[in-house]
């Protein structure tokens, strides 16, 4: 059975980001995939201190819940990262996890070790922003997510981005919820997509 790792990077459970992530997960065929959803706000996560200890052996010396997330990164086949848009970037919760992936950069670039390069793994980014639609409002996020997925050897295959949630919340946009659920239903066939609503 393949493993889906879904990271929920909003501190607001049951709100826009969580709802859109749940809609995608609702479409997943549970016979083929086990789903591991992590609410980052419920985890004890420490900021990277740039101590460079990971340059010695590719391991992070910080003792917190990131160890559980590292294990899921090692085992996962499909990665779904959901974050609200905060100041045109990902949430601070999401950024803590991304920064803690320095260990993978050290493993590959300082220690010249292969991580998961030969295992087919895909990644999808979901994000919601309160402001009205702007064609470039998610661009800073996308670059960050691209580098994050590269660090854990995941092929970045898609973005589902929603603007204007301050005026019209996700739960009032059934068409979007159905569309993102279809992405979940077809996760096995997913190829590159960029959807901005």
Image (tube, rainbow, N blue to C red):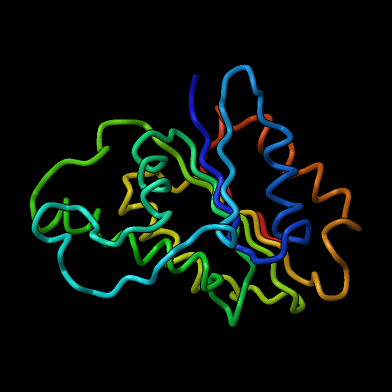
The relative height of residue 131 versus residue 64 in the rendered view (above or below) is: below
Which one is nearer the viewer's eye here, 39 or 106? Answer: 39
Q: How many marks?
A: 0
- Please say if 17 is above or below 177: below
Task: Determine the residue positioned at 56% across, 48% down.
Answer: 38
Q: Is residue 121 left or right of residue 5?
A: left
* Left or right position of 155 against 13: left
Q: Is residue 157 above or below residue 98?
A: above
Looking at the picture, tell me which residue is in the foreground, 1 or 39: 39
Q: Nearer the viewer, residue 135 or 9?
A: 9
- Residue 131's spot in the image, x, y percent? 74, 79
Residue 179 found in image quarter: top right
Q: Position of residue 111 (x, y in %)?
A: 8, 52
Q: Using the image as rendered, state which of residue 98 and residue 167 is in the foreground.
A: 98
Could you tell me residue 45's position as x and y percent? 44, 63
Residue in the picture at 64% in, 30% down: 186
| Residue beneath the point at 40% across and 36% down | 121
Q: Is residue 120 left or right of residue 165?
A: left
Q: How far from the left and from the top, in percent, is residue 177? A: 80, 47
Quadrant of the image containing the C terminus = bottom right
């Amino acid at each position: 059975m393949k493993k889906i790792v879904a990271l929920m990077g909003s501190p607001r459970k049951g709100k826009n980001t969580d709802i859109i992530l749940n809609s995608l997960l609702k479409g997943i065929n549970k016979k083929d995939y086990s789903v591991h959803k992590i609410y980052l706000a419920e985890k004890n996560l420490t900021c990277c201190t740039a101590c460079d200890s990971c340059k010695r052996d590719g391991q992070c010396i910080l003792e917190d819940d990131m160890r559980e997330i590292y294990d899921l990164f090692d085992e996962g086949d499909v990665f779904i990262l959901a974050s609200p848009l905060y100041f045109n970037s990902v949430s601070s919760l999401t950024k803590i996890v991304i920064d803690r992936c320095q260990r993978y950069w050290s493993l590959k670039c300082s220690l010249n070790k292969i991580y998961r390069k030969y295992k087919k793994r895909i990644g999808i980014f979901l994000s919601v922003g309160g402001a009205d639609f702007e064609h470039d409002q998610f661009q800073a996020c996308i670059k960050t997510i691209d580098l994050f997925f590269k660090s854990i050897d995941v092929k970045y295959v898609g973005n589902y981005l929603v603007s204007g949630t301050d005026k019209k919340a996700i739960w009032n946009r059934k068409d979007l919820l159905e569309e993102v659920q279809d992405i979940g239903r077809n996760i096995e066939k997913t190829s590159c997509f960029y959807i901005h609503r």
